[in-house]
């Protein structure tokens, strides 16, 4: 399976904001964005006199794509799917991305990052509605339950991640039982309820050219 294997922190620096790709490191003083809030490379500190509309749109698309850990073809497929649905394409896109199993595991607090969630899913540590699932891109539906397998409940990574998860960090469309290490995807969220630091409209404008 193709995936990005380079330095995650460089991606955050390129977008000049935290994309929370490294789990706990993102909340410490070791986060490179805190110390070097400019793009990597020898021209990172140089200032461009003018930034084009295309550049702004491209950066927004790259930011969202990297935030959810997707490759270009995967991201474009989600956009095409969103454009065929009723409603606003941008909002549909964000809601689709939030339904991905790796994102939901991350939102539950069962993994410190989406990347870590994907690894745990690929290693078959989770059950969806009682069945083992190892597909990070699975789109969950309202009422689906996700639980850690019985033999995986002693994993240190999961317990450490859950300890850092505060109740006010859990989105309202999710429900978690910390003691049982399981959660429920209550419903597909509305755009206004999603903690999403990006403008999906710029992505729509980019792909509409």
Image (cartoon, helix red, strand yellow):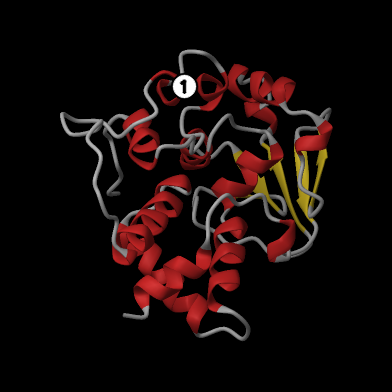
Q: Which residue is drawn at 46% across and 13% down?
A: 30
Q: Residue at x 61, y 86 (%)?
A: 86
Toward the viewer: 18 or 176?
A: 18
Toward the viewer: 149 or 144?
A: 144
Find disc 1 in the rendering and name its residue. Answer: 34
| Location of residue 143 (image quadrant) | bottom right
The answer to whether 96 appears left or right of 54 in the picture is right
Instruction: Report how many numbered discs are placed on residues in the image.
Output: 1
Q: Residue at x 58, y 51 (%)?
A: 101
Badge 1, how many Cα within 10 Å: few under 14, some, many 20+?
A: some
Q: Where does residue 203 sit, x and y in percent of width and height?
A: 43, 67
Q: Would you place residue 80 above or below residue 26 in this image?
A: below
| Location of residue 190 (image quadrant) | bottom right
Q: Would you place residue 51 above or below residue 54 in this image?
A: above
Q: Where does residue 206 sit, x and y in percent of width and height?
A: 36, 71
Say what secondary structure mark 1 lies in. Answer: helix
């Amino acid at each position: 399976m193709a995936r990005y294997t380079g330095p995650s922190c460089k991606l955050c620096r390129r977008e000049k904001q935290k994309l929370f790709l490294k789990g706990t490191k993102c909340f410490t003083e070791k986060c490179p964005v805190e110390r070097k809030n400019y793009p990597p490379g020898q021209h990172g500190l140089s200032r461009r006199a003018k930034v084009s509309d295309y550049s702004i749109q491209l950066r927004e698309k790259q930011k969202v794509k990297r935030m959810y850990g997707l490759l270009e073809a995967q991201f474009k497929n989600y956009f095409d799917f969103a454009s065929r649905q009723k409603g606003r394409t941008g909002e549909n896109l964000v809601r689709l991305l939030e339904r991905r199993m790796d994102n939901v595991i991350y939102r539950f607090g069962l993994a410190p990052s989406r990347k870590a969630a994907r690894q745990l899913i690929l290693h078959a540590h989770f059950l969806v509605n009682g069945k083992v699932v190892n597909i990070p891109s699975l789109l969950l539906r309202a009422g689906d339950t996700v639980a850690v397998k019985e033999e995986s409940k002693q994993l240190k990574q999961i317990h450490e991640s859950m300890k850092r998860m505060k109740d006010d960090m859990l989105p309202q469309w999710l429900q978690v039982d910390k003691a049982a290490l399981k959660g429920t995807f209550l419903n597909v969220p509305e755009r206004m309820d999603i903690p999403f630091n990006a403008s999906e409209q710029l992505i729509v404008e980019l792909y509409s050219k």
